[in-house]
Image (cartoon, grey):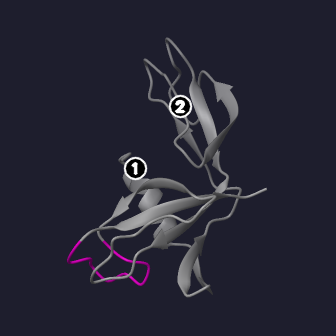
Amino acid sequence: MKNFPKWFFSTILTTSMFLISGYFCLVIASDTCVWEGKAPICSGKCSPGFTLVERDKKGDGKKCTTGTKARCCLTTKIIIRGNAPFCNGKCKVGEERLGDSEYGPKGKKCTTGSAAICGLTVN
């Protein structure tokens, strides 16, 4: 599974939690955007759950000598599935598995298996 950058999980942790169908759903504002790609050699790409909205040589800072940076905006609700201590999380039909977590939706550590980080596209 994809390894997400540290800012991704800090963004998740600073969002509001809502109880939906017995699971906690982390809802992230759709205007959460980041610049991907590092100067001087840029090859900015958006991670799953993000949509490319702009390309630029400078983006959020230093200018690229080759390639471009990508401005990526979150277009997915993040849902953690699998309750600790025995997580074994699985995404539901229509959700995309974005990765795994050692912690369940209530912040408790999994002793076996892992929780699933699932994404649901927001229209």
Q: Position of residue 103 (x, y in %)?
A: 33, 74
Q: Which residue is mark 2?
A: 45
Which of the 4 image quadrants contains residue 102? bottom left
User: In the rendered view, would you say 32 is above or below 104?
Assistant: above
Of helix, strand and loop, which one carries label 1?
loop
Name the residue located 28 percent from the left edge and 80 percent from the top edge: 86
Q: Which residue is mark 1?
A: 4
Name the residue located 50 percent from the left edge and 27 percent from the top edge: 62
In the picture, measured across the screen, residue 86 lies left or right of residue 95, that is left
Name the residue located 48 percent from the left edge and 55 percent from the top edge: 97
Q: Position of residue 115 (x, y in %)?
A: 37, 69
> Which stretch is magenta?
103-112
User: In the rendered view, would you say 108 is above or below 46?
Assistant: below
Q: Which mark is residue 27?
A: none
Q: CA distance from mark 2 to mark 1?
A: 13 Å
Quadrant of the image containing the C terminus? bottom right
Name the residue located 20 percent from the left edge and 78 percent from the top edge: 111
**Frontmost residue, 27 versus 20:** 20
Q: Position of residue 119 (x, y in %)?
A: 57, 58
Of helix, strand and loop, which one carries label 2?
loop
**Extreme residue toward the right, this view:** 123
Q: How many labels sit on residues?
A: 2
Question: Which amino acid does the dot numbered 1 rest on?
Answer: Phe
**Extreme residue toward the top, this view:** 66
Q: Please check the rendered image and state whether residue 75 is part of the magenta-colored stretch, yes or no.
A: no
User: In the rendered view, would you say 55 is above or below 93?
Assistant: above
Q: Position of residue 57 (x, y in %)?
A: 60, 21
Do the CB atoms of the residues marked 2 and 1 lie less than 8 Å apart? no
In the picture, measured across the screen, residue 61 lies left or right of residue 31, that is left
